[in-house]
Image (tube, rainbow, N blue to C red):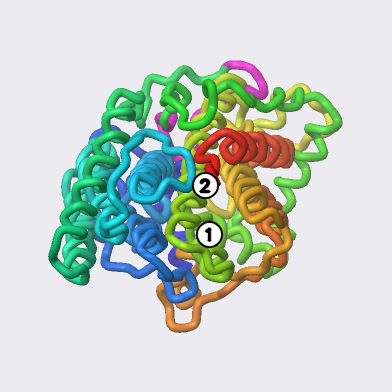
Amino acid sequence: MRLLGRAFLTVSLAVAMTATVAGPAKSEFAVRSLIMGGGSLISQPRTLGAASQSMGDAVTAWNANAGEAAIAACISPINDPLHESRMYAMTHVAIHDALNAIDRRSRPYAFDGRVTRRTSATAAVATAARDVLVPVLGELPNPPFPPECGAAGIASVEADYAAALAAIPDGLAKSRGIEVGAAAAAAILALRASDGSDTEMLDFDYPQGTQPGEYLFTPGFDFAFAPGWADVSPFVLRDSSQFRAPPPYAVTSRKYTKDFDEVKRLGGDDITTPSERTDDQTEMALFWVESAPLQWNRIARTVSAGEHLDMWESARLFGLLNMALTDGYIGSFETKYLYNYWRPVTAIQLAATDGNPDTEADPTWTPLVPTPPIPDHDSAHSVEGGAAAQVLRRFFRSDRISFETCSLTLPAGSTCDDADPVLRSYGSFTQAEKENGVSRILVGFHFRNAVDDGIKHGRRIGSRAVRLFLRPVR
C-alpha cells in the first residue's frame, strides 16, 4: 500500500512530511505528497474526483479550484492543513463579500461595498478568489515548502482564472465584476496581513517532557510542528482559548487505562504490531487521513449541489465552513501545546515508566500511519469534524442529509482520482463527524478522550460561526 511506505512520516492531523529512513535531519527535511510515493517535491496533476465535483455555480467551482491549487502547491491532501484552511477561509470571505456588494443578502466580513446589480457576479467571484489565492500561495513558508510548490499552485489558479474570464462576455458588467472582486480580495488580505500565520512551522528546539504523560517527539521526528499556531488571529473566536477543551486524563487513572488499551489494540500497523481492526475499520482509518479542509469542502460541495443552493447561499455556506475550520486548528493547537500531552505511540512504548500498574508496555508498538509531531490533546482532526458538521447542521437546519464522498488517501485504485473510487456513504453529518473522529483511534494517532473532547470543541466553534457571522439580512 503506497500510504504505508516506510519513507513517509505523517506530520499533523492529516499532515505528512518526509525524512530519510535513517531519521530526520534539519538539512534533509523535505515535503512530499504522501500519495505520490515519494517522487518530486511538486505534486503531479490531480483531479478532486468525479464524486467531489459539484460545480453548479461559480462559488462551488472556485471552491474546487482552490482545492486543486492546494494540491498543486504541496499543502494538500496531507501536508499542511493549517495554511490550507486559512487560504480557503480568506478566499471564501472575499467571494462572499464581493457577491454581497452586488446584492446584499448577508452581512459582510471584511469588505462593505455596494455596486450596481448590473455587475457580473461570475467575474466578481473569479477575481475575488484569484486575487486571494495567488498572493497566499506565494507566501507559503519555506521551509518546509520550496518555491516551486507555490509556483505550481499559482499556475493552477491562473489557468482557472483565464478560463473563467474567457467565458464571460466582455463589457461593463464584466469590468465591474473584476473591480469589485479585486476590492473584496484586497480587504481580506489587508485584514489578515499580520495575523501571525508566518509563525515557525518546524521547531527543532521545542522542549520535550520529562515526566510520564508529557509530550516527547514522536518516532522519526526531532521537531514539534507549528507550536505557535495558537497565536494566529482567529476569524470567529474571541481568542484561541475561548472554547479550550478540558485537560486530558491522568496517566494513572482508570479512564486513561481504558483509552490506552483501546488504541493499543486497534491502532497498530498489522506489520510490526498486530491489530484487531476489521477491514472496514482499516479503510475508515486511511480514508480520513486526508486533509480535513479538503474533505469537508468536498462534502459541502456535494450537499450544496443536492440542496440546489444559489451563488449567494453557497458563498455564505463556504465562508462559514472555512472560517470555522481555520479557527478549529487555531483553538486546538492552543489546547495541544498548553496540555503538552504525550501521543499513544509514546505512551505505549514507555508504559513501563508511567506509574500505572494496569498499562503494559510494548517498546516496538507501531501505529498504522506514523504519528504527527504534535501533542495529543485534543484531536485537531476531530475538532475540524465537529466544527464542519455543526456548520452544516446549522446552515441546512437538519442533520439528516445523506451524501457520499471519496478520499485521496486510500490505496492506489481506490482514490477519488481512480476510475472506480471507494465511496463511503453517510446518512447524517453526525455520522460522518463521529467516523472522522474514531478514525484517529484506528490509525493509532489519538486516545478516545482527545477525540471526544475535540468533537465538542469543534461544535462550539461551528455554532459561534453560524450564530454571529455572515448573518442573513433578509
Q: Is residue 221 magenta?
A: yes
Count of marks, rendered view = 2
Residue type (three-letter) at the residue carrying disc 2: Leu
Name the spot of residue 178 as percent of width and height, x first: 20, 52
Answer with left or right where residue 314 lies relative to residue 204. Answer: right
For disc 2, the neighbor class at 10 Å (few under 14, some 14 to 19, many from 20) is: many
Answer with left or right where residue 429 lies relative to residue 318. Answer: right
- Residue at 47 percent across and 17 percent down: it is 207
User: Could you tell me if the residues under marks 1 and 2 are in contact, i.e. CB atoms within 8 Å?
Assistant: yes
- Residue at 83 percent across and 33 percent down: it is 255
Q: Nearer the viewer, residue 365 or 327?
A: 327
The overriding secondary structure of the stretch rendered in magenta is loop
Name the spot of residue 455 as percent of width and height, x first: 68, 41
Q: Nearer the viewer, residue 224 or 26?
A: 224
| Mark seen at residue 109 | none
Q: Nearer the viewer, residue 147 or 127?
A: 127
Evaluate whether residue 274 shows in this view.
no
Q: Is residue 80 magenta?
A: no
Name the spot of residue 26 as percent of width and height, x first: 28, 33
* Residue at the extreme bottom of the image, as rendered: 419
Q: Label 2 belongs to which residue?
A: 321
Tell me the element at label 2: helix
Point out the stretch of residues depicted in magenta.
210-225
Q: Label 1 belongs to which residue?
A: 300
Q: In the picture shown, does residue 314 fall above or below 92? A: below
Disc 1/disc 2 C-alpha distance (Å)? 9 Å
Q: Nearer the viewer, residue 228 or 203?
A: 228
Name the spot of residue 465 as percent of width and height, x first: 57, 37
Residue type (three-letter) at the residue carrying disc 1: Ala
Q: Earlier in the sequence, mark 1 or mark 2?
A: 1
- Residue at 39 percent across and 59 percent down: it is 59
